[in-house]
Amino acid sequence: MKTVQWIVGWVVAVSATGLFAENWTQWRGNTRDLITSEPGLLKKWPENGPKQLWQKTLGDGYSSAIVVDGTLYLTGNIGDKGSTRGMLYALDAKSGAEKWKFEYGPEWDKNYECARATPTYCEGHVYLVSGLGRVVCVNAATGQQVWAVDTHEKYSGRNITWGIAENPLIYDNKIIVQPGGDDTAVVALDLKSGDLIWKSSGLSDRSAYCSAALITLKGKRQVVTMTENNAVGVDAETGVVQWKYPYRNKYSVHPNPPILIGENRIFLSSGYNYGSEAIEIAGDTARKVWEDKSNSNHFQGFTLYKGRIYSSGGNKLSCYDPKDGREVYTVAGAKKTSFCITPAGMITYDEMGGAVMLVDIQPDRYSVMSTFKVAYGSGPHWSSPVVADGVLYLRHGKVMTAFKIK
């Protein structure tokens, strides 16, 4: 009995101190903000980089992985142009061994023909949106399809220049996707069946490569996203449009979800020299508070961390004061880079050349602790770093590699 009590007490103590490893359940991490509280990570890597655990060649893709309870889920394209298909893979996270794979249908193959879809995990199921706007629900344990909806066919959706690149948002038994049709710029589908719950009547903009965010503004939850012409907020329960803010760059490419940087302030950034802006929401109106044209975030991400905005845009990784947009510092050596933030530091992954850095970031200073280079795969390094259960997962084209960082 004393042994049982000791074990229970130890488990409670460990849970309280946060020593259990985290999953990574969706694009940008569990809370969709590029931040993980994964404990016990190395604060400095070996000189030649962390120890490689495994490497596996799969279908081609730019998408990132998710990791849930020891299983890694990842998409990749197979086949030639004209017959390209999307595959969803389930791998053993520790060894890379394949558990199952599922062909979820035709995939985008007009240009940059690699899988875009990072899956989202929820309650034993994996959900994804193909580059052609098909939403699929798959049993996470068996790889069997539960339901699928072609949102372009059903909701008069329209594709875009480089194909749909959307990672589904899930909350309250709803999955949020953006067909971009008449009165269906954004829709909420039932998580169990794929049936329509609501649509954004009056909003008919096409998709703009953006994945929606769930944001609370003045105590009210809103689905906030970027369409081809606007930053928008719709009521999370009904889909009724709450506000719109005109926002369009050269190609209507807005792949980064808006983030909350104050009680009623949101940060936006897009590429092609459009720059970054902070806007303030008051009821049904939105106004610009400040802007920085030097930080055009093409698609590599930004977040708010310990009172600072970190944004990779304009060929630099910058730290900003959210109050006035003042650039506090830029991280030397980090150019067009994706990143995630861990308790051990920020992990960056450069688009060109594949340099990976571990950076100690503080509100007013930084220090590069370690660096190595991804020397496998081909094409641009467009997949974001993922950290789960003491392992760093980095993808380059067809190749996924796992590194021990704990």
Image: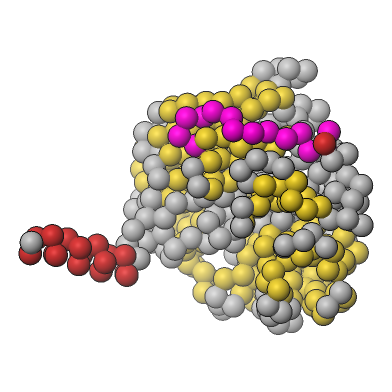
- Residue at 83% across / 33% down in the picture? 153
Residue nearest the observer in this picture, 320 or 80: 80
Residue nearest the observer in this picture, 325 or 138: 138
Q: From the viewer's perspective, is 114 left or right of 200?
A: left
Residue 393 % position (x, y): 48, 44
- Residue at 64% across / 33% down in the picture? 147
In the rendered image, the vertical position of residue 63 relative to residue 261, given as above or below = above
**Is 253 covered by the magenta stretch?**
no
Give the magenta-colored segment's residue range: 140-153
State the quadrant of the N terminus.
bottom left
Residue 78 in view here: yes
Residue 312 in view here: no
Q: How many marks are shown on the rendered structure? A: 0
Q: From the viewer's perspective, is 47 left or right of 27?
A: left
- Residue at 54% across / 46% down in the picture? 121
Residue nearest the observer in this picture, 294 or 100: 100
In the rendered image, the vertical position of residue 92 relative to residue 213, given as above or below = above
Residue 5 % position (x, y): 14, 65
Residue 119 % position (x, y): 59, 42
